[in-house]
Amino acid sequence: MAGRFIEVENLGKVYETAAPGTPPALQSVSLAIEQGEFVAVMGPSGSGKSTFMNIIGLLDTPTSGAYRLNGRDVAGLTTDELAHVRNRVFGFVFQGFNLLKRITAGENVALPMIYSGVSGGERRRRADGLLARVGLAPYGGAMPNRLSGGQQQRVAIARALANQPQLILADEPTGNLDTQTSVEIMDLFTQLNRETGVTILLVTHENDIAQYANRLIRFKDGHVVHDGAVVHEEALP
Amino acid sequence: MNLLAVVREAARSLGANKLRTALTMLGMVIGVAAVVLMLAVGSGAQNQVNRAVSSMGSNLLVILSGSTSTGTLRMGSGNAPTLTTGDAEAIARLPNVQAVAPTFPGGAQVAYGINNWGTQVLGVTPEYTAVRDWPVESGDAFSETDIRSSTRVALLGATVVEKLFDTEDPVGKTIRIRGQPFQVLGVLKKKGQSLDGRDQDDSVLVPITTAQSKLFGNRFPGTVRFMFVQAVSQEATSAAENDITLLLRQRHRIQPDADDDFTVRNLTQVAEAASQTARILSLMLGAIGSISLVVGGIGIMNIMLVSVTERTREIGIRMAIGARQRDVLLQFLLEALMICIVGGLVGIAIGVGGAFAVGRAMQIEVAFSAWVMAVAFAVSAATGIFFGFWPARRAASLKPVEALRYE
Ligand SMILES: Nc1ncnc2c1ncn2[C@@H]1O[C@H](COP(=O)(O)OP(=O)(O)O)[C@@H](O)[C@H]1O
Ligand SMILES: [Mg+2]
């Protein structure tokens, strides 16, 4: 499979529901992301970060430009193929966790494996392993609303890892968490990136959080205004 | 994702949303049970009336002594019955009349061995069993000789047989009516209830002459209380009614401006009125059932629509983690189907059980129709499936990001 992992060219998005005269939510975004990168996406509120994430995650479609995944233009994928990519290649972590609240943490983690055809016993076994991986081994039977925000986000991360994805998309994963918990979650992402080589694309408002990444993309008014290596604070004089 | 996994996922989802599942099912149960119950009672009543009507005998008129034109039946104890056996013979010769059965009724205590029973004894002629469509099931009917010689013979209704005889065959046995010995000639076929709910089998038939002269005594010899007249056809009943009125007025020498001293009732019309009433009752009960069906349907609809937001977001989450449209649709369709099938079956069970309970408590007949159950089931199920599946279909056709954002 030729081509780079993720490559977007002149990506643009105009929401149909946007008021007339408002500038596009995303304009001529061109960039590439390689396997194994840990990318932080920053920018003021309304600058197009979520729009970008949703398009990259195949949850939404651009109105202009091209998006190639592993060299293949995703515009040509059928809805079933898109679902397959979301299931096998991507893992999502949302600001609001987006767990199914009426099933247990373990069942939530196992959910993506239902759609990838993993058998019931194997699903449970793997879900237990994943919960242990995010430090929640004893909580498989707990309902999500019995868990703290940080724990719920860990469950969501375990779910994102269920089918061994190549890319984790996390849109403000620490936005609803306190500082201490945020640090723990970011440590978990860093660890995952280092140990498994999974690519991480993570939106954050906070510079502290961005410090965990090794590349920073900064948005403003739908444009990419900065794209470069993160200058780690400890490296500063 | 294989079918079994989807079925499990649907079942788990129902189990996880117990309140929603229970309320939706409740709507289904209420609708189906009400329809099944109401219509079971309605068609049971209709059956009962129809059977009573057909047990009356066909194309019948009944002629009573005394007039009802002033509102009440003028047949006080002092008054002589105005109808005579001569009237009966004259009516029998009318062209529109097939047969006439003059009747002389009375109450009596009947006994066999140590068994004793109070019943209605009808003095009748041999025509009676034909006119009332009430055949002798075993043994023999009366002969003309029995009438002429006022013999003490009797035909027993099924209830009387049951009360007097345990296992013995009554035919040929001698019973006592008002202390007098009567030989049982035969047993009448079971007839069931009359329109006014009386047990028609609780009767004993004896020759009319025997009733008049030996059992009840007759202060006015040659008179009868009432007679059944069978017209030659359904269409002839009205003509026969007119002919009889004219004939009797003539025979009784009633002045043109005077009231009849007898009453003719067309039982065909009575039967029609009763059937009509039963039909209306049945329709009303059906309407009540249908209203419940609609109410149940609205309940189902509300529950389904109330949960659209939650379910749309759920679909968004499922799609974000890799569910295909068809996985989601199949799951939601199965959920709706499971609710409807279980709810429908429970509804039918409650409807049937309830109908039996009502039937027993009120001593009425209930009748079930697979067709009614199928329609009630189908209507509720269609509501449930439509409102369960259609929002899911819409949600699944959204982009995942739109479903996730749904408020
Ligand atoms: N569904 C939508 N319909 C219309 N406009 C939208 C929608 N989502 C986002 N926008 C607009 O697009 C722009 C970018 O939004 P977003 O990508 O959510 O920014 P960010 O995540 O950086 O805060 C904003 O001006 C926002 O108002
Ligand atoms: Mg955002």
Image (spheres, coloured by chain):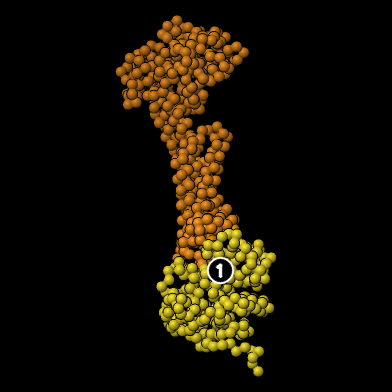
Determine the residue positioned at 38% across, 16% down. B100
Most distant residue in the left direction: B95
Most distant residue in the bottom direction: A237
Q: Nearer the viewer, residue A127 or B247?
A: A127
Determine the residue positioned at 56% across, 10% down. B176
Looking at the picture, does residue B226 appear above or below residue A237?
A: above
Q: Is residue B171 visible?
A: yes
Q: What SS does tag 1 mark?
A: loop
| Percent coordinates x, y for residue A185 in the rendering | 64, 76
Please identify the quarter of the rendering in which residue B248 is found: top left
Most distant residue in the top direction: B149
| Percent coordinates x, y for residue B173 in the rendering | 53, 10
| Percent coordinates x, y for residue A61 in the rendering | 45, 74
Determine the residue positioned at 46% across, 56% down. B386
Looking at the picture, does residue B182 appear above or below residue B162?
A: above
Q: Is residue B387 visible?
A: no
Determine the residue positioned at 59% across, 83% down. A213
- Residue tagged by mark 1? A163
Amino acid type assigned to the residue bearing label 1 in the image: Asn
Q: Nearer the viewer, residue A158 or B174?
A: A158
- Chain identifier, yellow in the render: A
Name the side, left or right, on which A103 lies relative to B43. Answer: right
| Percent coordinates x, y for residue B9 in the rendering | 55, 58
Q: Nearer the viewer, residue A72 or B225?
A: A72
- Chain identifier, orange in the render: B
Numbered circles on residues, count: 1
Most distant residue in the front direction: A1
